[in-house]
């Protein structure tokens, strides 16, 4: 089963890192194949940054995302540039305070940045909250895989904070209608 | 490299520009070390003169080029394959080099190791001609515990430093080992001494530099053949290979074949003959047909270039349509 | 050994013109190397392009005759890959200060453990006498037929500013001092820069009113002044005549250096 996940937000939110962690979880801990790509260049810093992950049970041939079935959108500009074209069958996780628009496809509102600030007291973990929500809502990788991949990827000394952020993100969407 | 090389007992140095980068690589190589540099776009152009020096002095070295859109500063973060002829012909004079083209992160690893082996064996610069897509993406890779590698053959004592045996490749005279070798970019005799006005010495030297690579092009050829009985054959290297693999995966039509080159230079002309029933070769490249032109030199079959520039990769759909147009209904 | 034994006899005759000063510089350099008793098998001489850069080809050690201006970059690679080798670079004013200017300042900045001997003949001697970055104002060359209008580079000041550990200037008249200076440079850690004003009778001298080779050497003798003396004159409010070649040691210091065997 091929999944195409597209992340977008603004520079500094850890959009790229979130994608790298997701791909790492799939490959290293779920035994799947993954390709992670991203938009480079100065445009990707100030403006909308974008990264994509393809996850598949079989080797991935064409490495570019064609029709994402999962979106993680963390800025209005990111939505306009990379989210607005989402196909009707896709699912989109939206940082509900930062994105004003809503897509035509099914979407899940996750107030990741606010929760990071208010609950975890560190805005920087908003991307990890998003990852927690993403995995809880879609099961695109296993819980165990994302937990280990997060621990592999975050700076020493921040493991507990990030694990908490991941679990908190899961909790924000748990029990929601997955339809 | 800056992070990993010192931990592995190597030396990393950031030079002031690409000209100095390749110069330092060549200098390091003469101490017997394996040395490489990596660049893209204008940096590759800057290296051209010293690449010629490495060719003339038969200095083993590896140059990685993550190709991007040009000419000039062009598209610094977008994919291209526009330097395939530059790596072959970009320095002045006649010569031959070896160029490899990875189509995955795994091959980025495997072919880098192979590049060093080829550089050491042939005493020639070896290019790893990747593109931004392959160079920037992350994907699953398996790293072996050890990479077996060949040795640079040392020159026999008492033999002139640039005298080659039947394989046309002189043994290496590492600095500091008592060879007392003079290495010059000038045309030189077998002693390594400048001999710049003898037509014969120049012709003998340049012909040997070309021959030592070109005469072994079949032996070192590295390619994959899918559906050798096919009529419509895609020929690829680098990222477009992935799109073609997707086409063949999605529609297993035996009439469509794929020749995927991992080694592009010296051009493995025999690979073209792997498809005796070929009616057309389709060559998707992220340039305006640089290797398509080379293929045309080696076949009477129609060669159709499928160029794409600007940074996007050919989509499987575009390529399926292109092959569909060639297949009789 | 003597310095003579460091030459490749089978390379003679050399390409230098009658009266050229480069041979003097090579002899002084090899004398200093020889005095140190260095093993020829552990020395590497490196150069770029130009008359100066042919020198390594006449020396019995391993040698690398590279591309125009890039000798220091090649030498950096050699030295960083094997710091136990003694690496000496021969260069000229065009090679070092024009096409190779960037590598020059960066090699000084890194303060890499090389000895750099620059034969400054104030002209492109090999290629037909074009003006170089050190051709003095008013100097005649094929590209400055009415006299050079461009100010010249002070290579020693440049080397000092860029960070070289040892910087000195002499002329081909000062063979004893030059030999001592090279000796000091070879043994001092970090980048040692030895600039030598040399006569080029073929392309500089004959265009600039030096009828005989000896006239130019006489000029180097009479127009050079020990740097400390020049500074004293200036310090006392006096004036040092324009065009004076200030010779002697510019700096000897112990900035952190690269490529030094601990």
Image (tube, coloured by chain):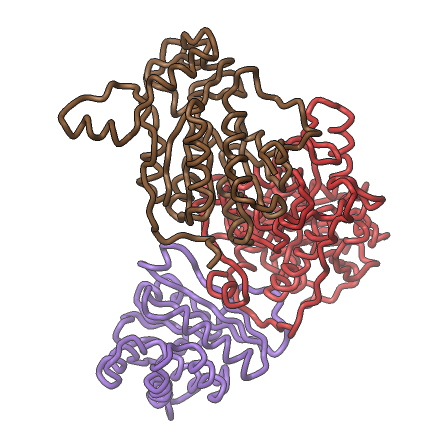
Chain colours: A purple, B red, C brown
The residue closer to the viewer here, B247 or A11, is A11
Residue B69 makes an appearance in the image: no
Q: Is residue B157 left or right of residue C227?
A: right
Q: Assign the C terminus of chain B to one quadrant of the image.
A: bottom right
Vertical order, A153 against C157 (above or below): below
Give the residue at the far bottom of this rendering: A175
Q: Is residue C94 left or right of residue B187?
A: left
Residue A144 makes an appearance in the image: yes
Q: Is residue B165 left or right of residue A163?
A: right
Rendering coords of residue A3 (x, y %)? 53, 75
Rendering coords of residue C163 (x, y %)? 34, 44
The residue closer to the viewer here, B85 or B295, is B85
Rendering coords of residue C115 (x, y %)? 47, 41
Identified at 60% across, 71% down, the residue is: B141
Vertical order, A107 against B62 (above or below): below
The residue closer to the viewer here, C126 or B254, is C126
The residue closer to the viewer here, C50 or B83, is C50
Rendering coords of residue C98 (x, y %)? 43, 30
Which quadrant of the figure has residue C208? Answer: top left
Identified at 34% across, 51% down, the residue is: C255
Give the residue at the far left of this rendering: C237
Instruction: Give the number of marks.
Output: 0
């Amino acid at each position: 089963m091929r999944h195409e996940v597209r992340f977008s937000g603004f520079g500094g939110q850890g959009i790229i890192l979130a994608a790298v962690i997701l791909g790492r979880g799939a490959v290293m801990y779920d035994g799947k194949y993954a390709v992670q790509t991203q938009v480079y260049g100065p445009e990707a810093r100030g403006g909308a940054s974008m990264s994509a992950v393809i996850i598949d049970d079989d080797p991935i041939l064409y490495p570019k995302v064609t029709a994402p079935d999962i979106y993680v959108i963390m800025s209005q500009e990111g939505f306009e540039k990379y989210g607005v074209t989402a196909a009707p069958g896709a699912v989109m996780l939206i940082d509900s305070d930062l994105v004003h628009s809503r897509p035509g496809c099914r979407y899940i509102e996750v107030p990741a940045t606010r929760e990071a600030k208010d609950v975890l007291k560190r805005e920087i973990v908003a991307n990890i909250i998003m990852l927690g929500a993403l995995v809880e809502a879609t099961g695109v990788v296993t819980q165990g895989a994302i937990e280990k991949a997060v621990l592999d990827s975050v700076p020493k000394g921040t493991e507990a904070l990030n694990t908490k952020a991941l679990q908190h993100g899961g909790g924000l969407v748990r029990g929601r209608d997955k339809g | 490299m800056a992070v990993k090389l010192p931990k592995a007992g190597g030396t990393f140095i950031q030079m002031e520009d690409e000209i100095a980068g390749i110069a330092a690589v060549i200098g390091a190589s003469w101490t017997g070390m394996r040395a490489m540099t990596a660049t893209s776009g204008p940096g590759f152009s800057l290296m051209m003169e010293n690449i010629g020096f490495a060719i003339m002095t038969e200095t083993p070295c590896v140059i990685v080029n993550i190709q991007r859109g040009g000419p000039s500063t062009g598209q610094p973060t977008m994919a291209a394959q526009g330097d395939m002829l530059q790596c072959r012909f970009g320095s002045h004079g006649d010569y031959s080099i070896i160029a490899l083209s990875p189509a995955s992160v795994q091959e980025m690893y495997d072919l880098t190791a192979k590049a060093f082996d080829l550089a050491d064996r042939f005493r020639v610069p070896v290019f790893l001609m990747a593109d931004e897509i392959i160079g920037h993406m992350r994907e699953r890779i398996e790293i072996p515990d050890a990479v077996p590698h060949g040795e640079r053959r040392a020159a026999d004592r008492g033999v002139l430093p640039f005298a080659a045996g039947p394989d046309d490749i002189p043994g290496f005279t590492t600095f500091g080992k008592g060879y007392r070798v003079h290495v010059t970019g000038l045309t030189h005799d077998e002693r390594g001494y400048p001999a710049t006005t003898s037509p014969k010495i120049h012709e003998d030297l340049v012909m040997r530099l070309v021959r030592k690579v070109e005469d072994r092009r079949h032996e070192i050829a590295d390619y994959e053949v899918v559906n050798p009985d096919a009529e419509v054959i895609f020929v690829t290297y680098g990222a477009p290979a992935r799109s073609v693999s997707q086409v063949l995966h999605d529609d297993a039509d035996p009439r469509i074949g794929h020749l995927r080159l991992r080694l592009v230079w010296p051009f493995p002309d025999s690979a073209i003959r792997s498809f005796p029933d070929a009616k057309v070769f389709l060559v998707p490249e992220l340039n305006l047909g640089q290797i398509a032109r080379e293929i045309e030199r080696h076949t009477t079959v129609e060669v159709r270039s499928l160029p794409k520039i600007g940074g996007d990769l050919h989509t499987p759909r575009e390529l399926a349509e292109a092959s569909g147009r060639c297949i009789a209904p | 050994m003597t310095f003579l034994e460091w030459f490749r006899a089978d390379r003679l005759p050399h390409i230098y013109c009658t009266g050229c000063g480069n041979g003097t510089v090579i002899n002084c350099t090899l004398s200093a190397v020889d005095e140190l008793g260095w093993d020829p098998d552990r020395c590497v001489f490196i150069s770029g392009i130009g008359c100066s850069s042919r020198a390594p080809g006449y020396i019995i050690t391993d040698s690398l005759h590279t591309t125009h201006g890039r000798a220091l970059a090649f030498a950096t690679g050699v030295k960083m890959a094997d710091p136990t080798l003694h690496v000496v670079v021969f260069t000229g004013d065009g090679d070092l200060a024009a096409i190779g200017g960037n590598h020059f300042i960066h090699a000084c900045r890194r303060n890499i453990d090389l000895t750099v001997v620059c034969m400054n003949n104030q002209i492109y001697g090999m290629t037909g006498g074009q003006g170089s970055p050190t051709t003095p104002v008013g100097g005649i060359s094929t590209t400055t037929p009415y006299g050079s209008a461009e100010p010249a580079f002070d290579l020693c000041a440049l080397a000092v500013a860029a960070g070289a550990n040892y910087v000195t200037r002499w002329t081909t008249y000062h063979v004893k001092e030059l030999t001592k200076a090279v000796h000091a440079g070879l043994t001092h850690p970090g980048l040692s820069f030895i600039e030598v004003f040399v006569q080029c009778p073929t392309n500089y001298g004959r265009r600039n009113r030096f009828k005989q080779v000896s006239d130019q050497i006489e000029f180097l003798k009479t127009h050079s002044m020990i740097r400390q003396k020049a500074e004293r004159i200036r310090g006392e409010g006096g004036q040092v005549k324009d065009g004076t070649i200030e010779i002697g040691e510019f700096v000897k210091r112990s900035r952190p250096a690269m490529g030094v065997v601990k």
